[in-house]
Image (spheres, rainbow, N blue to C red):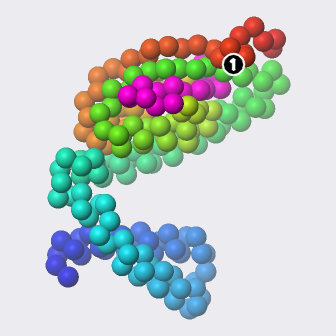
Amino acid sequence: MTGVQAYRTLPKLVALSALWLAFSGKLDALHLGFGAISVALVMRFTRSLALEKTRADPQHPMGQARWRRAAVYLFWLLKQVAVANVQLARIILDPRLPIDPMLMRFDTRLRTSLAKVLLANSITLTPGTFTIEVRDGVFLVHALNEETASPTALGAMRDRVASVFDEDVGPIRVLEMKRPASSEGAER
């Protein structure tokens, strides 16, 4: 095994082993043996998949990703999900139930498909928001209220995704913000 192969293999081995331990929660010989066999099989069958092949092709979106920024983004996203969970709990537990659905259509100006997919999934993972449609870089997002549909919040998420892929996107361009037809004029 060359130094480059070890550099690529060791983090994968550590990550898969840690996942196995976290998910199994068992430290007896039988479970550790199953874990070692599972990790070995996954490493064997995935060694030639996308990440290995795309490093050689700088034009491929996975080859363009900045992995340190992606790791920072993951932790930032987890924090945003936790904050959104608290906000959603407050909305639900409020006796007035301040739900005021909003639809927001905005142009992300993201170039790569992978960046668009990451943003769409990040929006959907955040409680209170849902990506309904993505077409030519224009997103249609449903939110429970105007605060969660904030162009500032969605723009910050888009900017962080763009930084993972080294894309220069400029300011977010909101094309439309409206309340869905079913909530207009509804009694509160």
Whole-percent x and y of residue 7?
A: 23, 70
Does the magenta-highlighted stretch encompass residue 145? yes
Does the magenta-highlighted stretch encompass residue 10? no
- The residue furthest bottom is 29
The quarter of the picture where residue 9 lies is bottom left
Task: Identify the residue at image location x=41%, y=82%.
Answer: 40
User: In the depicted view, which residue is nearer to us: 94 or 23?
Assistant: 23
Tell me the element at label 1.
loop
Task: Identify the residue at image location x=73%, y=21%.
Answer: 98
Residue placed under numbered mark 1 in the picture: 100
Kindly tell me whether residue 83 is visible in this rendering: no
The quarter of the picture where residue 184 lies is top right
| Residue type (three-letter) at the residue carrying disc 1 | Asp
Question: Residue 49, relative to residue 37: is it above or below?
Answer: above
Task: Identify the residue at image location x=68%, y=14%.
Answer: 181
Q: The C terminus lies in which quarter of the figure?
A: top right
- The residue furthest front is 135
Q: The N terminus lies in which quarter of the figure?
A: bottom left
Label 1 crowding class (10 Å Cα cut-off): few <14, some 14-19, many 20+?
some
Whole-percent x and y of residue 123?
A: 51, 36
Q: How many badges with numbers are in the image?
A: 1
Kindly tell me whether residue 143 is visible in this rendering: yes
Q: In this picture, which residue range is highlighted in magenta?
A: 133-148
The quarter of the picture where residue 84 lies is top right
User: In the depicted view, which residue is nearer to us: 139 or 150?
Assistant: 139
Whole-percent x and y of residue 179?
A: 63, 14
User: In the depicted view, which residue is nearer to us: 66 or 136?
Assistant: 136
Whole-percent x and y of residue 151?
A: 47, 21
Task: Identify the residue at image location x=31%, y=60%.
Answer: 50
Could you tell whether 96 is left or right of 119 in the image?
Answer: right
Question: Residue 168, relative to residue 41: is it above or below?
Answer: above
